[in-house]
Image: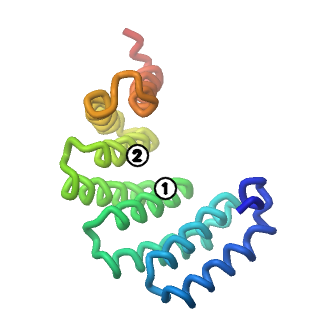
Amino acid sequence: SIYYTQGKCAEAEPYYNMVLALHEQLYGPDSIETAQAHLKLSDLYKFEKRFEKALEHAKKALEITTGKFGENNEHSAVMLSNLAALYETESRLLDAALLYEKALAVRESLYGEESLQAAASMHNLGCLYVKQNSFDRALAMFNTSLAIRKRELSPEHLLTAASQDNIGMLYYRLKKYD
């Protein structure tokens, strides 16, 4: 909503709740539309740093999605990644890692180990591994993601540049300037 994009979350929240109620009424409480409404509320609460409420809605979105489609589908991988990002924001890094790894496994089984979807999950995991000071694991994720993005997109693509930037920042952090 316009309120959310303007940072007026208190004004946006009632509208997001109305959308959730409408989606539950129109599509049912276990519909993908309802899951998306929960996800939007989760994003709003995350922005407001109301993490318990954000987690509540992210978990509900994941529950609906996995109930509707099972665990091995792109919708569930997206919801797993969103919940992982919330855990990461709260410094619950082990919880986040488990969910990011699960999302990666889903995407690799759906699209292949060398897919752009898997590369996105690898990128997320690499960033998390840096926060865990697991630099070798982070570098492996970043390098694999970079190779996929170079091949599938181009060496000049913004996502490829993001992978290169992460590798550069990691080497800088490790004081490996060569």
Q: Earlier in the sequence, mark 2 or mark 1?
A: 1
Amino acid beneath label 2: Asn
Quarter occupied by residue 119:
top left
User: Which residue, as the protein is rendered here, is positioned at the far top?
Assistant: 178
Q: Is residue 141 visible?
A: yes
Identify the residue position indicated by label 1 in the image: 85
Image coordinates for residue 156, horizontal then vertical, percent: 40, 22
Q: Is residue 86 above or below residue 27?
A: above
Q: Are marks 2 and 1 in contact (CB under 8 Å)?
A: yes
Q: Is residue 136 visible?
A: no
Q: Could you tell me which residue is drawn at 42 percent across and 65 percent down?
A: 79
Quarter occupied by residue 175:
top left
Q: Quick one: 173 or 127, which is closer to the camera?
A: 127
Q: Quick one: 42 or 28, which is closer to the camera?
A: 28
Split into 4 quadrants, where in the image is the C terminus? Answer: top left
Split into 4 quadrants, where in the image is the N terminus? Answer: bottom right
Residue density around tag 1, few if under 14, some if 14–19, many if 20 or more, within 10 Å: many
Amino acid beneath label 1: Ala
Distance between mark 2 and mark 1 Cα atoms: 9 Å
Element under disc 2: helix
Q: Could you tell me which residue is drawn at 50 percent across and 86 percent down?
A: 27
Q: Quick one: 96 or 113, which is closer to the camera?
A: 113
Q: Could you tell me which residue is drawn at 46 percent across and 20 percent down?
A: 172
Identify the residue position indicated by label 2 in the image: 124
